[in-house]
Amino acid sequence: MPTSEISAEPTEPVVAANSSFSAIAAALRSAQTVVVLSHVRPDGDAFGSQLALALSLRALGKDVTVWSEEGLLDKYSFMPGGELLTPPPAEAQTFDLAVALDTAVPNRLGVAADAVRADTWINIDHHPTNPRYGDLVYIDSTAPATGQILFELLHDQQLPIDAAIAENLFVAISTDTGSFQYPNTTARTFEIGAELLKCGVDVGRVSQLLYESYPRRRVELLRELLGTMRFQADGRVASFSLSLAVASRLGVLPEDNEGLIDHLRAVQGVVVAVFFEELLEGKVRVSMRSKSEAADVAAICQRFGGGGHKLAAGARVRGTLAEVEQRVLEAICDVVNCNS
């Protein structure tokens, strides 16, 4: 799918049949040059899915390119194949096949979307707001992670899965399920986790690197955020904020924010937790988490040009930190009060 044909704005999801695993695998096998992409501000599911697919394709003898604007974040530096991740080039490059993983809307691919010229696009994702861009599409909003869909694809089509690929898939699934704790975790998720351990994943080592190896500045950041904490709607809505000034003073990196919102979500009585992060371009990054599908944060974020899942969603909203906080919290409180 030519990049020029990819919509830059989120749209309502279209109900349509998924491409078959066999059709996707046929495209992967027939292509010689493949670029594997995921969203900006990548998380464990993004990196894990990209690196797992890249290593599987390299095992088939493919010429694989893996792009990420940020490169491999320090937090995920232990992941096998991380050296394959490079920033997109300034000049466009041509590939037989482009694969977008875990990316709800095309503009979340960032500058990589403009750097790709590909005969065929594959779109594999688990976000219900995905508008099904691409030539071959597989969207499963019941899957807790794109990494889980990717495991099913590789396993079903007998594509390579070795210890390194299994570790990347485990990182993808573990991080997007909150270490197998979130409500979207299913019996199948645990079965896949067991299969990945059989492939050689050292769950103790990987979990320690993911959840017990944070830099000190992340704890300093949490202390600052808790100082801004506020509760509304009789304690059902909790939020905190990070200004550019504080981020600069602490020297925090974008990945330091990951997971901090869970401290708010874990408070007894809180239904919706929100993290506001001031950005350089006159926008505010809004991250939301919900404990109840009655408080659908994806629907709230869609009002502000974002999207995601019912229980985890986000948006980038133009305005000052104070303005965005007021508008977004009013919208959340309306939903929470209506469903209380």
Image: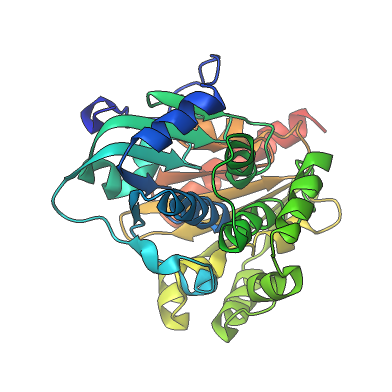
Asked whether 157 or 182 is in front, the reply is 157
Does residue 131 show up? no
User: Which quarter shows the C terminus?
Assistant: top right
Residue 4: image x %, image y %? 21, 29
Residue 142 in the image: state x and y as whole percent: 69, 32
User: Where is 298 relative to 227, above or below?
Assistant: above
Q: Residue at x 68, y 33 (%)?
A: 296
Residue 217 lies, with reference to residue 32, above or below; the image says: below
Residue farthest bottom in this picture: 216
Quarter holding residue 90: bottom left
In the image, residue 167 sits, relative to residue 45, either above or below, namely: below
Q: Position of residue 202 (x, y in %)?
A: 72, 70
Residue 194 in view in this figure: yes
Q: Is residue 303 left or right of residue 233?
A: left
Say left or right for 286 vs 333: left
Give the residue displayed 51% in from the left and 32% down from the top: 302
- The image shows residue 96 at horizontal and vertical percentages of 27, 36
Name the image colouring.
Answer: rainbow
Q: How many marks?
A: 0
Q: Residue at x 25, y 33 (%)?
A: 3
Q: Nearer the viewer, residue 161 or 54?
A: 161
Outermost residue toward the left? Answer: 91
> Is residue 92 left or right of 185 when viewed as pictured?
left
Q: Residue at x 57, y 52 (%)?
A: 45
**Residue at the top extreme, as displayed:** 16
Quarter of the image that includes the N terminus:
top left
